[in-house]
Image (cartoon, rainbow, N blue to C red):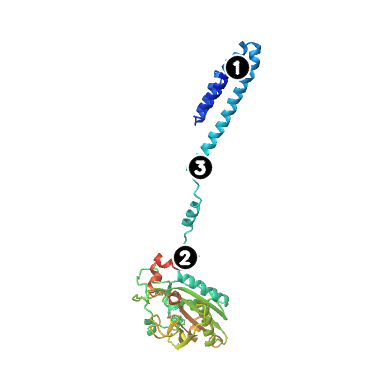
Amino acid sequence: MSITNLEEIRESFLEKLFMLSKEADVLNLKSDFIGKNGIVSGLLKSLKDMDPEERKSFGPKVNELKDFIQEKTSLFLNKLEVDEINEKLSHDRIDTTLTERVQVKVLKHGGYHPRTIIQQEIEDIFLSMGFDILDGPHIEDEFHNFEALNIPKDHPARDMQDTFWFHDPNSQLDVDGGGKKRLLRTHTSTIQVRGMLSRKPPFRFIAPGVVFRCERTDASHEMVFTQLEGMMVGKDISVSNLIYFMKTILREIFKKDVEVRLRPGFFPFVEPGFELDIRCLICEGRGCSVCKHIGWLELLPCGMVHPNVLKSGGIDPKEFNGFAFGLGLDRLVMMKYGIDDIRHLQSGDLRFNSQFKLY
Ligand code: PHE
C-alpha cells in the first residue's frame, strides 16, 4: 500500500460522492469506505502487519483519510438536506394574496334596506328631541283602527282605507272574547290610541311600522307599506310646534333647509287637518316628473288631535291638546334615493338592495 493508493481512494470516494443525491446512498458509500468492512477500515486493520517504520509514516495518513471521509460525508449530507428544503420551497410557494382573497369572500356582507336606513335616521332625530318609540300589533280590532280615532261604524271615512278583514267565522282571529272583528291595521294611527291609553300627558312619541291596504299596486301604491306615526300631547301645543318638528326632521334627512306648505286635509282624527307638502327637492320647484310638474310633493298628512280622539285615549281635551302626523316612509325613501317605483322596495331583489350604504 502506498501514499499514491491513498490519494486514489480519496479521489474515488469524492468522485462517487458527488454523483449521489440520496441520503441512503451517501450512507452506503460511507460504509463502503470507512464502515466495518470498508476499504479504509481494511487498511487500518492491516497496519498491525506492517513494520514499525512503515506504520509510523502510513498510519497517520490512513487515519487522516478516514477523518476526511467522515467529515466530507456529513457536510454532503447537510448539503443534501438544504437542497431538499430549497427544492420544496420552490414548489410549495406561499401565496401571500390567498388569505386576502379568502377574507373578502367571508366578509362579503349585506346592507340595510334603504327604508331601514331612513327609519333609523328618523328615530335618532326624534329620540334626540325627547320622543319615545312605540310599537303596536299588525292585527288590530275596529276600536283601535277606527272607533277610537273618531271613525264610527258606517262613517264614510271607513271607505277611505280599503281594509283587509279576517272573515273566517271559526277563526280565533275573527272573534276575540268580546266578539271584535279583526283586521290588518290600515295605518299606524292605531298606536296613537295605544300610546294615549298607556301614558299620562305631557308625552311625545313616534311609531314606525308596516300597514296594509287592499289596493291595486302600481308605481306609487303597494298593499304593504310603511308609515311613521307621531304624536305630541301637552298644554298649549300649536300648529307652529308641528311645523317646527317637521321642518327639523326634513332638514336632518335631506341635509338642507326644506320649504314646506300646509294645505287643508280631511282626516276624522285631526281638526284642523293638513297635508304638508315640501318643495320638490329634485327640480327645486321648477317642475319635474317626480312632482308631476307641480313643484311640490305631498309628504305627510297631519293635524291637531281631535278632542274625541283625546277622550278615547282617556285625556281631557279641555286641559290638553296635541298634534299627530303620519309620515309615509316609503315616499321619503323614494325621494331621498331617487327611486321611481315603490315596488322595488318590497321586491327583495339583491341587485336593488345592494346599491345602498353598507355597514
Ligand atoms: N293615518 C292617516 C293615514 O294613514 C295619516 C294621518 C296620521 C293623518 C296622523 C293625520 C294625522 O292616511
Could you tell me how far apart the alpha carbons at marks 3 and 2 are, in whole angstroms?
Answer: 42 Å
Between 225 and 28, which is closer to the camera in this rendering? 28
Could you tell me how far apart the alpha carbons at marks 3 and 1 are, in whole angstroms?
Answer: 43 Å
Mark 3 or mark 1, earlier in chain: 1
Between 74 and 103, which is closer to the camera in this rendering? 74
Query: Residue at the location (40% across, 80% down)?
Result: 290
Label number found at residue 111: 2
**The N terminus sits in image quarter:** top right
x, y percent for residue 111: 47, 65
Mark 3 or mark 2, earlier in chain: 3
Mark 2 or mark 1, earlier in chain: 1
Q: Quadrant of residue 210?
A: bottom left
Question: Which amino acid lies under the numbered mark 1 shown in the image of this protein?
Answer: Leu
- Residue under label 3, please give it: 89
Looking at the rendering, the quadrant in which ligand 1 lies is bottom left
Residue 209, visible in the rendered structure? yes
Could you tell me how far apart the alpha carbons at marks 2 and 1 are, in whole angstroms?
Answer: 84 Å
Q: Does 54 appear above or below 297?
A: above
Q: Residue furthest front?
A: 4
